[in-house]
Amino acid sequence: MSLELRDIRKRFGPVQANDGVSLTVEAGELHGLLGENGAGKSTLMKILSGFYTADSGEIVLDGRTLDIRGPGDAIEAGIGMLHQDPLVFLPFTALDSFIAGSPGGFVIDRRQARKEMMELAERFGFDLDPNAPAREFTIGARQQLEIIRLLWLGARVLILDEPTTGISATQRERLFETLKQLASEGMSVIFVSHKLEEVEELCSRVTVLRQGRVTGERELPCPADELVELMFGKSVVIQTKEPVELGKPVLEVQHATLEDELVTVRDLSLSVREGEVVGLAGLEGSGQRALLRAAAGLLKPRSGTIRIDGRTPRTYHEFLDVGVHYLPAGRLEEGLLQGMTITEHFVLADESTPFFVDWDEAEQQAAEEIRAHFIKGRPDSNAEELSGGNQQRLLLAMLPDHLRLLLMQHPTRGLDIESAAWVWEQLLARRHDGTAIMFASSDLDELLMYSDRIAVFFSGEVIDILDARTATVEQLGYLIGGVRAAS
Amino acid sequence: MEAALATILAAAAPLVFAVIGETITEKAGVINLSLDGSIMLSAMAGFATAFVTGNLWLGFIVAALVGMAVALLIAFASISLKLNQVAVGFVLFALTRDLSSFLGNPYVHQRLAGVPHLPIPILENIPFLGPIFFQQDLVVYGSLVLIFVAYWFIFRTRPGLKLRAVGERPEAAHARGIPVNRLRYLYTAIGGALVGLGGAAFSLDMKLGWSYQHTLNFGWIALAIVIFGGWHPYRAALGAYLFGALQIIALKLQPIFPGLSQVLPSMPFPIMILTLVIIYTDWLKRLADRFPSLREFLASEPPSGSGVPFEPE
């Protein structure tokens, strides 16, 4: 039995998520699908499992072209997908989650279903209580429940989308064993991941996606730097940053435990000095955002201390008062106010605005700022009318003159090269005042070019701090994928 | 005692239809906020039909169709057009309420023979239970059967599991090949038909006749009882009976406190809301944790997908 995807295309609005992807998976094969976030892996797999319909392309199973119009058709053809967030019904009992959507008579025979569920669970050594609500299950247990459900429905092709996110090491081990066992029984397994290490450990062949296209296919084992190159592309690093004398530490994080919705960061210690730029690398949700938010006073650490110039501000306002400023990634969502003009933004940002606003004067000042920061817009332009680059310029223009610590998330995401260079010119100039800068980015070149040091996050842990002068894209790529020994 | 309980059972019958109907609709993930208006319009339509044709049962059928039609409008607006369900529901409430006054004008205070009494032979002679359960009319019997059928359907059958699935986590239902939006249409329509029957049960049985805003506020209280009922048919029915009991008590107190005759009929509404506030607290959840076998009955959480349109991509 073999599965073939031919020239799959899928567009979401302006984004071409899959741009002519072809892929072949043999029976009994553990096939890896590798690529960074947004490369189009999940979209491709959701098309294969019928969750999405492709704009064009063919899916061929055993030489027969499938007409997959919805998930029901895919399940019938024997294609089952375990989604990244296992799609169980949280308040239902595990048994009901197991049964939901299965074929059968009008009245549910729960006794029979329970028996079959327990048999399957036992076969793989899963310990699942059929009567407990799925809510009480860990992510790993929910996955196990979904896997046996898909097998119960007769899956012959099993897709797993980033299955190791959020599960424990032992559950991961059990999962890998299970997948190997299934492959040895003739099942085709497609393992979607952005983690090099895992694909290398588990799979026999790998296809790499980048920006919606297949950049290569390799038999494993194969040299890892080849895969890194396929994932991230070749890039030339130019160092153009003029050196600045580093002063005393501005930000000192000591043994901090941070908890946000996505990840828990434990025992984090890091400091940033005057004039220093520290880049935060890692996959989205590995802890960078938690650190930025904690340093900005928006996230209270569970334990540990965060000092700014030796002081420990408590509220967000106290952080602002000691000269901390945070520019989040969602410019329009978190940074700017939709429906308000550039003039109104400056008036709001200016603390000294009196009760009655002199709008004529405010407009003149706004016009000056617009000139000084090369913003393409008028004082009465609404924030959402500006392009991404100009929104970022507006945010920078609103920054107070003297800052101690500037925190940023994806400072140049979505900006063209010219705007990005201008933004960084402005940012780096602040170093001469002794401003410390910490930013998170998924652009490896940006990290290498503008940072002094790069802290690499991997699932809530800083696994390495690199000197940006000597680090390479390959080295960063490894570390982001969780491969420690990368020298 | 038996007489009082029998009266409560009968008084609450229309409300039982409405709350079970709305429970089914909300279980599937759609909120029909027009309830107060659609009950009124179907009560009017049912009465008018029965009055004109002289056929009581035709009145019930037309009322169910009217309830279904309003529900289908809600479904179309919220499922296909993806409009805000609160806004659409509220507008439809106002529209159907006013429509009932406008169209129902000729039938105000007209007279009609209601649903006949129908004691069930043999069973009616069972001591205590007989007078309560088996000396009623078809509407009351129907409401009792409905409670059990709804429970059995939702929790014991495969289509019922699918119904809960599309309301709880539509993307997970979709991934299992369950046609989310088609089922939402279906159960919104079925729920609406039951609400319509509830309306007819007012105007053709429990509160026989038609007057200006004949069923005022019963729709709102039904919506509240669905929440009190934790989207569970048994608990929702319990809520309806509690409200029925409050109404009977208010009625019995009228001659005792003649000075309060303006206030008493409306007292059950605030008391019911107060009960909801008290009941809808944490301790029910803690009780459910202690007695896992009662979880299904005690768990009072809304279907997570309720009120949220589903788009597969």
Image (tube, coloured by chain):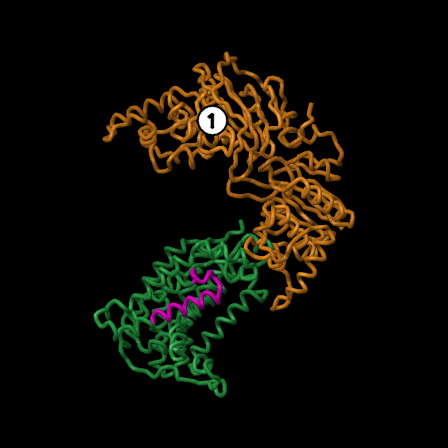
In this rendering, does residue A72 appear at all? no
For the question of whether residue A194 can be seen, the reply is: yes
- Determine whether, in the image, residue A481 is placed left or right of residue A179: left
**At 50% from the left edge and 87% from the top edge, which residue is drawn?**
B122
Q: Is residue B232 magenta?
A: yes
Q: Is residue A323 above or below residue B292?
A: above
Magenta region's main secondary structure?
Answer: helix
Quadrant location of residue A485? Answer: top right
**Which region of the structure is painted magenta?**
B226-247
| Subunit of label 1 | A
The secondary element bearing badge 1 is classed as strand
Q: Is residue A67 left or right of residue A374?
A: right
Chain A: its colour in the image is orange
Residue that extends furthest to the bottom in the rendered view of this protein: B121
Provide the residue designation for mark 1. A407
Residue at (33, 78) in percent of width and height: B208
Residue B158 in percent (x, y) is at 59, 65
For the N terminus of chain B, give its image quadrant.
bottom left
Q: Magenta stretch containing residue A450, yes or no? A: no
Percent x, y for residue B292? 56, 59
* Tint of chain B: green
Q: Amino acid at mark 1?
A: Leu
Q: Position of residue A337 (x, y in %)?
A: 37, 36
Position of residue A284 measured from the top left corner of the image (x, y, whole percent):
56, 35
Image quadrant in which you'd find residue B37: bottom left
